[in-house]
Every structure is written in C-alpha cells, then in structure tokens.
C-alpha cells in the first residue's frame, strides 16, 4: 500500500531527524557531542589559549597556515510572504486547499514563522479556518518542507479528522485518508 509506505517513511525520517538533532548538539562544556550510537569520539571545539599560542612546529607561518577557503554568501533571511497562493480545488475525496509555499518559506526557521504563514493562508482563504486545517498545515510546515522541499503545494482538507500530533505525523500529515 503506497500510502502506508509514505507514512512509514515520514515516521522513520522523524526518528532520524530527532536522533540526529538530539545527538549533534553542542553541550555546555563547549565540546561537540556525538550522535546517539556513534563510535566517534567527542572533539573539542575550543581553540588554543591566546597566552600560550599554537605549539611550535619549526615551520614558517606560510607553510603551516592553511589557505583560507572562500566563504559562500549567507542565504537571504526568510521573510514573508511565506505563502504564494492558497486555492480551493476538488479531489476524488472532497475539497482540498492547495497551499503553495514561497522559497522564503522553505528557509524559514523563526519561532513565529509558522503562525505568520498560517495567517497568510487565512488572508487568502478565510474559509480554511476549520477544525484540523491548522494542524495539517503545521505538519506540512514542520515536515514536508524538510522531507519534500520540491513539493509545489501542501494539500489541506477540511474533511480530514482532528487527530493528535503523533497520529498526524504517523499518517504523513494526511489523517483519515490518502494524500490528494
């Protein structure tokens, strides 16, 4: 069943992302921690003390200093608008709201960005403010952006049941029926 495979893939991706995020943080000690289950040792990210300087190697500065790598420009900060369009359409299962994210939405990481984007959806489609629609949007905002960044629209359906966040994730953001 392709729908169940997509759900399993999304749930598996959630576990991988969670374990990676939890295991790859920098602790209070300033040392980089390793991923859960990794055999790699933790490495220190601290640099030599300025008072002691780097250890002497007997080499001249020009031969022991690596060439600096050219830095790439930082990506533009994510700013609204986050929603290019929100249009109603029909599917074999009922009506669907097709929400097209902007490139800026795909880069957004701010704590209020999802709420800003949902407000944009409601300005474009005020009748989308029904039970379960925000939860579907939040699932797509959190997971579809990461796992399917090239997906042109996120489809939200008012006929889908309201479910917990865990069930929403297990159902691939599409509780109560297949993806449309």
Image (spheres, grey):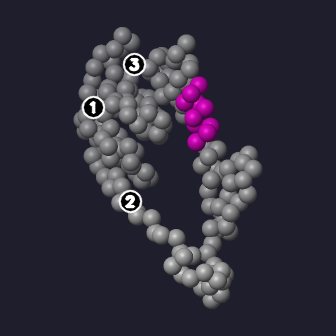
Q: Which mark is residue 72?
A: 2
Above or below: residue 84 compared with residue 25: above
Is residue 66 visible in the rendered image? The answer is yes
- Quadrant of residue 98 in the image? top left
| Magenta stretch bounds | 8-17
Q: Earlier in the sequence, mark 2 or mark 1?
A: 2
Above or below: residue 18 compared with residue 92: below
Is residue 130 visible in the rendered image? The answer is no
Compared across the picture, whether 13 is left or right of 154 comes to: right
Quote the CA–CA distance across marks 2 and 1.
34 Å
Tag 2 secondary structure: loop
**How many C-alpha atoms fall within 10 Å of the one at disc 1: few (<14), some, or many (≥20)?**
many
Pinpoint residue 96: horizontal percent, then vertical percent: 34, 21
Pinpoint residue 131: horizontal percent, then vertical percent: 42, 29
Compared across the picture, whether 63 is left or right of 119 comes to: right
Foreground residue, 95 or 45? 45
Q: Earlier in the sequence, mark 3 or mark 2?
A: 2
| Residue 75 shown in magenta | no
| Residue 13 shown in magenta | yes
Above or below: residue 36 compared with residue 163: below
Quote the CA–CA distance across marks 3 and 2.
39 Å
Residue found farthest to the top: 92
Residue where numbered disc 3 is placed: 180
Of marks 3 and 2, the one in the foreground = 2
Above or below: residue 103 compared with residue 156: below
Pinpoint residue 144: horizontal percent, then vertical percent: 45, 34
**How many C-alpha atoms fall within 10 Å of the one at disc 2: few (<14), some, or many (≥20)?**
few
Residue found farthest to the bottom: 51
Q: Which mark is residue 86?
A: 1
Quote the CA–CA distance across marks 1 and 3.
15 Å
């Amino acid at each position: 069943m392709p729908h169940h495979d997509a759900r399993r893939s999304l749930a598996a991706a959630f576990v991988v992302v969670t374990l990676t995020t939890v295991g790859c943080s920098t602790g209070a000690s300033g040392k980089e921690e390793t991923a859960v289950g990794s055999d790699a040792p933790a490495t220190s990210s601290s640099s030599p003390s300025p008072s002691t300087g780097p250890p002497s190697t007997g080499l001249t500065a020009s031969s022991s200093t690596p060439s600096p790598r050219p830095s790439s420009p930082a990506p533009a900060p994510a700013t609204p608008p986050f929603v290019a369009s929100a249009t109603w359409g029909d599917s074999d299962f009922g009506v669907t709201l097709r929400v097209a994210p902007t490139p800026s939405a795909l880069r957004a990481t701010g704590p209020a960005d999802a709420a800003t984007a949902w407000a944009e959806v409601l300005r474009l489609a005020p009748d989308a403010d029904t039970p379960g629609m925000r939860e579907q949007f939040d699932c797509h905002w959190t997971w579809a952006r990461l796992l399917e960044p090239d997906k042109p629209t996120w489809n939200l359906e008012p006929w889908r049941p309201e479910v917990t966040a865990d069930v929403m994730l297990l159902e691939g953001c599409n509780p109560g029926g297949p993806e449309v």
